[in-house]
Amino acid sequence: MPVLHSKIIGSGDNHFIIFHGFLGMGENWKTHAKNLAEKCYCVHLVDQRNHGRSFWSEDFDYDVMVEDLHLYLNHHNLKEVIVLGHSMGGKTGMGFALKYPDRVKKLIIADIGPKYYAPQHQKILAGLSTLNFSDINSRKVAAEHLANYIPDMGTRQFLLKNLYWVSHGQLGLRPNIAVLKNAAEAIGTAIESDSSFLKPVLFLYGGNSNYINPDIDTPMILDYFPKAKLIEIKNAGHWLHAEKPQQFFEILIKWLP
């Protein structure tokens, strides 16, 4: 079984795993990783399967992504780590902590709950799946194509980070869109477990995001994570770590000790 690709920033024995969201990659978290490294954390920016530089696979659900993390920790001989996951990465983190609680020291979840989410990336996936790199030979042309599907410029810029030069003049896309375009239900599925994770958990959510409604979602969160603390980042959406990076980092560092 292949091991997930990662970029490791910092050193020492206090290991910090960061799992990106759907259609993202570890590199999206590089600024936060450098800041954490300055606080003496060894940060692993991990690309999940079918994303970034990690391997492609037809198998894609939270069960296999939890095992990917388990294999990664064993491969790097990491006994107990801090895990931070955003969106899809947050669900991987929750699933891992519930199945392997002895391997997780603390858990941070960014703007996602354990509940079911209806498919919501169809237009994005349609745009990415119709990128024809026989005709598209520049980022500018790719951006123009995606504008037909994705009106928000910030979202387009985020997605365009997935483009790379396969060879001179030949662009490619890092995510495995052939698999991911059929993964909407797998991404939205609820976390299911008979266990609870009894160590500290921080849920950060954007005040402008609809992914977590504390009035509705808190009981389910506390059922799985009795020591969870929920903190709102005001005026932030789903990409709260990118929209309000200073506030996100300050809350994180204050909570970690």
Image (tube, rainbow, N blue to C red):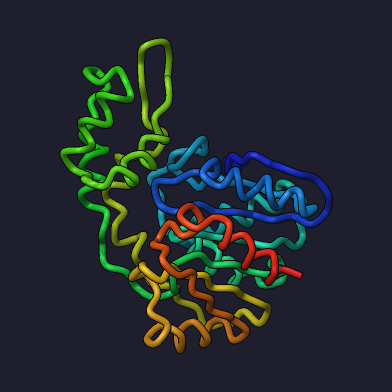
**Is residue 99 toward the left or the right of residue 168 in the image?**
right
x%, y% of residue 137? 29, 17
Please report the residue visible at 58 percent of the width from the left and 80 percent of the height from the top.
229
The N terminus - image quarter: top right
Which residue is at 49% across, 74% downward?
232
Image-quadrant location for residue 238: bottom left
Between 150 and 221, the one nearer to me in the picture: 150
Above or below, 11 relative to 210: above
Name which quarter of the figure residue 195 lies in: bottom right
Quadrant in which the C terminus is drawn: bottom right
Horizontal side of 136 relative to 174 (left or right) equals: left
Residue under the point 77% across and 60% down = 79
Residue at the outermost top position: 168
Number of marks: 0
Q: Nearer the viewer, residue 205 or 163?
A: 205
Residue at the left extreme, as displayed:
148
Residue 218 coordinates in the image, percent (x, y)? 46, 85
Q: Position of residue 199 (x, y in %)?
A: 68, 78
Residue 235, x across and y down, in percent:
41, 66
Q: Residue at x 76, y 44 (%)?
A: 10
